[in-house]
C-alpha cells in the first residue's frame, strides 16, 4: 500500500487516500458473557458502518466479511464492498443481535481456527476473480477476532491451531479481548510480553493482543481506526530543521536534520457527510475537504512531501483566527523499509523536538514545498503551516494565513470599564453555567449516527422483514435468507457425543473450486 499519488502528466486535484486492507471480523461468542456484550457491540458496529458507508470521496475501506463462532463457525457475510452496502451490513448486525444469549453450548477448540482458515480461503477465491487493478488492492488480509474469553489463552489456541496453515496472505492477525472493567494495560495494543516468543509458531505472522472496554464508545473508537491511512511502505512527510547542532546525525546533503513522519487525520471533515452543517461545501472532487497539507502530500511529485521549518514562534503569539482547515497529526514514521537503527534514531529526535518545544513554549512556522508546475511558466505558490507540540508523541499541524489571504478587519479595542449593570447581569448568567475543565468530544452527541442510518431506511423489498418479530435463533440453527458464500465452507468437526441434526449440503458442488463471482451473489429472502 503506497501513499496516495495522482496519475497523469501534470498535477491533479484528485486526492487518493490509501485504502485499508480487506478485513475479516470474527465474533467469538461465549455464554453467558455474550448477553453483556451483544447490545454494545452491535450498536458500535451499526454506528461505525453508518459513518463508513456515508463518507464521500475515495473509499477508505474495501472488502469486509463477518463470521461468528459458537459451537461451530459460520459465515454471516461473505466479502463485500463496504461502500454502498449499508443495508447488507445492517442486516448482518441484526442477525448478531438475534443470537442466543442464554443457556450453554459445548465450545469446540477448532472452531476459531476453522473460521480463520475458511475466511482466508474465501478471500483468496475472491481475489482470483477480480480485475487486475482491483487485485493489487487485495494482496493481503487483516483478521480481527473479538472475544470475551481471556485473550492470552485465545492467542495460544490460535498459535497452536494455525502453526501448519499458510498465512502469507495475512497482513495482521489480531485478538481483541472485550473486558468489563477499566483497561489495566496501557500498552495493550502491542503483543503481550509474556506470550510465546517462538517465532516459528506462526511463520511470518505475529498475533497482536489488544483489550477494549465493553462500552459503545470504546468499541466505536476501535472500529474507527479502520478508517485511518495505515500504509507503511514509505514515510509521507519529511520535516526539515536547519540547525548546526544536529549536523553530525544527518544523512541529508542540504539539511542538517530530517525527521521522517507519517501523516494522520485528527478528525473527519463534516463536508464529507450528507446533511451536515458543512454539507453545502461538499464537491464531487473532495479537493478541499482534507485541508491543504493532505492535498499537497498526496499530489507531491516526489516520494515525500517536505516541510521546511523557517522560524520559531512564541505559543502565545499566534491568533487562532489565522489558522484554517482541518488539523493534521505528524508522528514518527513506522515505514518498514527503514532499518531499525534509523527508525529508533528518528523517534528519539522526534521525541526530543516535542519535549523541547513544550519546555520553551514554542511553535514552529514551516513552509511546504510548492507543487511542481511541470512545463508551465507559472510560479508555484507555497503554503505555510504552524506546528504545535503536544503531551503525546505527536505534532499538530495547521495551515496558517499569508498576506495574500488576509482581509481588512478593524475592530474597536475592548474597554476596561464596562457598564456596571450590564456586567452584573452577564456575570450572573455566566455563574449559572456549568464549568468543565476541558472539552471532551466523546461526551457530546450530534445524533449524526441516527441521521446517517435514516438515509438508508428506505424500503428495500423483502430484505428480512420478519427479523424483528423472530425469537432468538438457537445455536447451530443456520439462516437461509442471507447472501451465499463465495466458496464451499470448510468441513465442521462434529461435536463429540452428539449426532448432527443439520442436513449436510448437497454434494454436487462442495469443491472449493466452486465459486460465485461477486456480481453473481444473490440475496435469497424468500427462504428455502
Image (tube, grey):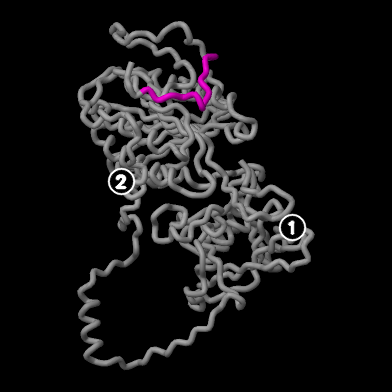
Q: Report the magenta residues as a range.
A: 513-524
Q: Tell me which secondary structure the magenta stretch mostly adopts.
A: loop
Q: Quadrant of residue 105?
A: top left
Is residue 515 magenta-colored? yes
Name the foreground residue: 369 vs 58: 58
Quadrant in which the C terminus is drawn: top left
State how many labels appear: 2
Name the foreground residue: 62 vs 491: 62
Q: Quadrant of residue 177?
A: top left
**Does 217 sit left or right of 36 as displayed?**
right
In this orientation, does residue 206 appear?
yes
**Does 302 sit left or right of 261 as displayed?**
right
Classify mark 1: helix, strand or loop. loop
Residue that numbered label 2 is attached to: 182
Residue 238: image location, x then y, percent: 65, 57
Residue that numbered label 1 is attached to: 252
Name the foreground residue: 518 vs 168: 518
**Does 32 sit left or right of 121 as displayed?**
left
Residue 274: image location, x then y, percent: 42, 52
Name the foreground residue: 152 vs 236: 236
In this orientation, does residue 329 appear?
no
Quadrant in which the N terminus is drawn: top right
Q: Is residue 343 above or below residue 249?
A: above
Disc number for residue 403: none
Is residue 1 magenta-colored? no
Classify mark 2: helix, strand or loop. loop
Residue 359: image location, x then y, percent: 51, 70
- The residue depicted at 51 percent of the width and 20 percent of the height is 516
Residue 131: image location, x then y, percent: 62, 30
- The residue depicted at 35 percent of the width and 92 percent of the height is 416
- The residue depicted at 43 percent of the width and 12 percent of the height is 491
Amino acid at each position: 500500500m503506497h501513499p496516495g499519488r495522482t496519475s497523469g502528466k501534470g498535477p491533479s486535484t484528485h486526492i487518493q487516500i490509501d485504502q485499508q486492507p480487506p478485513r475479516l471480523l470474527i465474533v467469538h461468542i461465549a455464554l453467558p458473557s455474550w448477553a453483556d456484550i451483544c447490545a454494545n457491540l452491535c450498536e458500535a458496529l451499526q454506528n461505525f458502518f453508518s459513518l463508513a458507508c456515508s463518507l464521500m470521496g475515495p473509499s477508505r475501506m474495501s472488502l469486509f466479511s463477518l463470521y461468528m463462532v459458537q459451537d461451530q463457525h459460520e459465515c454471516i457475510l461473505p466479502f463485500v464492498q463496504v461502500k454502498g452496502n449499508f443495508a447488507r451490513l445492517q442486516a448482518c448486525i441484526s442477525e448478531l443481535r438475534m443470537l442466543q444469549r442464554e443457556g450453554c453450548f459445548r465450545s469446540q477448540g477448532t472452531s476459531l481456527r476453522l473460521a480463520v482458515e475458511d475466511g482466508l480461503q474465501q478471500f483468496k477465491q475472491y481475489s482470483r476473480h477480480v480485475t487486475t487493478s482491483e487485485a493489487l488492492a487485495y494482496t493481503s488480509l487483516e483478521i480481527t477476532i473479538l472475544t470475551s474469553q481471556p485473550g492470552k489463552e485465545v492467542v495460544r489456541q490460535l498459535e497452536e491451531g494455525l502453526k501448519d496453515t499458510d498465512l502469507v496472505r495475512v497482513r495482521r492477525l489480531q485478538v481483541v479481548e472485550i473486558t468489563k472493567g477499566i483497561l489495566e494495560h496501557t500498552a495493550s495494543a502491542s503483543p503481550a510480553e509474556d506470550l510465546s516468543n517462538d517465532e516459528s509458531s506462526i511463520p511470518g505472522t505475529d498475533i497482536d493482543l489488544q483489550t477494549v472496554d465493553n462500552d459503545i464508545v470504546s468499541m466505536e473508537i476501535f472500529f474507527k481506526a479502520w478508517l485511518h491511512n495505515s500504509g507503511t511502505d514509505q514515510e509521507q512527510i519529511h520535516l526539515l530543521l536547519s540547525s548546526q547542532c544536529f549536523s553530525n546525525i544527518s544523512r541529508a546533503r542540504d539539511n542538517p536534520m530530517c525527521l521522517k513522519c507519517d501523516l494522520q487525520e485528527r478528525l473527519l471533515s463534516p463536508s464529507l457527510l450528507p446533511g451536515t452543517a458543512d454539507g453545502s461545501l461538499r464537491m464531487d472532487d473532495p479537493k478541499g475537504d482534507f485541508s491543504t497539507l493532505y492535498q499537497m502530500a498526496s499530489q507531491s511529485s516526489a516520494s515525500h512531501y517536505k516541510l521546511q521549518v523557517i522560524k520559531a514562534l512564541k505559543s502565545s503569539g499566534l491568533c487562532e483566527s489565522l489558522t484554517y482547515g482541518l488539523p493534521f497529526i505528524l508522528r514518527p514514521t513506522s515505514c518498514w523499509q527503514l532499518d531499525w537503527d534509523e527508525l529508533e534514531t528518528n523517534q528519539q529526535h522526534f521525541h526530543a523536538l516535542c519535549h523541547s518545544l513544550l519546555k520553551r513554549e514554542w511553535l514552529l512556522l514551516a513552509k511546504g514545498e510548492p507543487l511542481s508546475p511541470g512545463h508551465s511558466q507559472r510560479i508555484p505558490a507555497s503554503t505555510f503551516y504552524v506546528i504545535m507540540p503536544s503531551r503525546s508523541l505527536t505534532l499538530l499541524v495547521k495551515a496558517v494565513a499569508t498576506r495574500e489571504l488576509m482581509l481588512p478587519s478593524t475592530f474597536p479595542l475592548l474597554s476596561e470599564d464596562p457598564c456596571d449593570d450590564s456586567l452584573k447581569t452577564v456575570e450572573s448568567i455566566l455563574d449559572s453555567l456549568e464549568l468543565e475543565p476541558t472539552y471532551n468530544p466523546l461526551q457530546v452527541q450530534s445524533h449524526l449516527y441516527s441521521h446517517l442510518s435514516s438515509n438508508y431506511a428506505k424500503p428495500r423489498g423483502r430484505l428480512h422483514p420478519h427479523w424483528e418479530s423472530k425469537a432468538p435463533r438457537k445455536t447451530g440453527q443456520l439462516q437461509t435468507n442471507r447472501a451465499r458464500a463465495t466458496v464451499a465452507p470448510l468441513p465442521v468437526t462434529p461435536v463429540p457425543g452428539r449426532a448432527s441434526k443439520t442436513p449436510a449440503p448437497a454434494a454436487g458442488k462442495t469443491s472449493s473450486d466452486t465459486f460465485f463471482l461477486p456480481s453473481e451473489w444473490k440475496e435469497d429472502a424468500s427462504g428455502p
